[in-house]
Image (tube, rainbow, N blue to C red):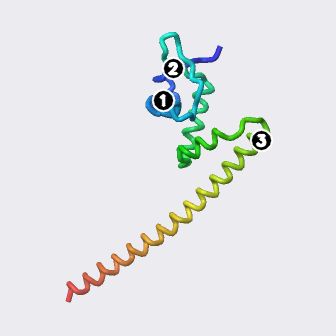
């Protein structure tokens, strides 16, 4: 028999807040959560594993909208694997583009730092005179 987890236990297992667990359910990132006789959520081991995948995606910087797109991919064995690989390749290209933009931004920041350092040096020379 598979273990079942309460919301609190699932939160501890996944490192996600109870609010996040419910939010992910609300927006369709996870579905078919079982309920006990009192209506309390009962998460399965596979639910916990899926929350961990979602956490991994978030740690990669993947926006929730793209996580929803990933989940919405067709659900037939081989095409799903290919579609999900292609999705991740596309996401990888986006991250590389973002990194390039960040590198450009960092270069601009470094130029401004140098500019202000030069101003400080000039100002110090002026004060020493």
Q: Is residue 2 above or below residue 55?
A: above
Most extreme residue toward the top, as rendered? Answer: 37
In terms of image quadrants, where is residue 94? bottom right
Q: Which residue is mark 3?
A: 79
Mark before the other along the chain sequence, 1 or 3: 1
- Disc 3/disc 2 C-alpha distance (Å): 32 Å
Q: Nearer the viewer, residue 64 or 11?
A: 64
In terms of image quadrants, where is residue 123? bottom left
Q: Is residue 77 above or below residue 62?
A: above
Query: Around disc 3, counting alpha carbons within 10 Å, would you say few (fewer than 14), some (14 to 19), or many (20 or more)?
Result: few
Question: Which quarter of the image is occupied by the C terminus?
Answer: bottom left
Q: Is residue 15 above or below residue 126?
A: above
Q: Which residue is mark 1?
A: 22
Query: Around disc 1, counting alpha carbons within 10 Å, would you say few (fewer than 14), some (14 to 19), or many (20 or more)?
Result: some
Where residue 110 appears, x then y in whole percent?
A: 43, 72
Q: Are marks 2 and 1 in contact (CB under 8 Å)?
A: yes
Say which element carries label 1: helix
Where residue 104 appears, x then y in whole percent?
A: 51, 69
- Disc 2/disc 1 C-alpha distance (Å): 9 Å
């Amino acid at each position: 028999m598979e273990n079942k987890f309460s919301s609190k236990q699932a939160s501890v297992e996944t490192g996600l807040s109870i609010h996040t667990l419910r939010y992910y359910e609300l927006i369709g990132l996870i579905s078919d959560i079982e309920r006990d006789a009192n209506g309390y959520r009962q998460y399965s081991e596979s639910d916990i594993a899926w929350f961990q995948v979602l956490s991994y995606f978030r740690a990669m910087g993947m926006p929730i909208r793209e996580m929803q797109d990933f989940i919405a991919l067709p659900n037939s064995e081989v095409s799903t694997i290919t579609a999900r690989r292609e999705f991740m390749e596309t996401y990888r290209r986006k991250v590389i583009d973002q990194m390039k933009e960040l590198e450009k931004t960092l270069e601009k920041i470094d130029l401004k730092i140098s500019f202000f350092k030069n101003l400080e040096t000039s100002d110090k020379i002026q004060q020493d005179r």
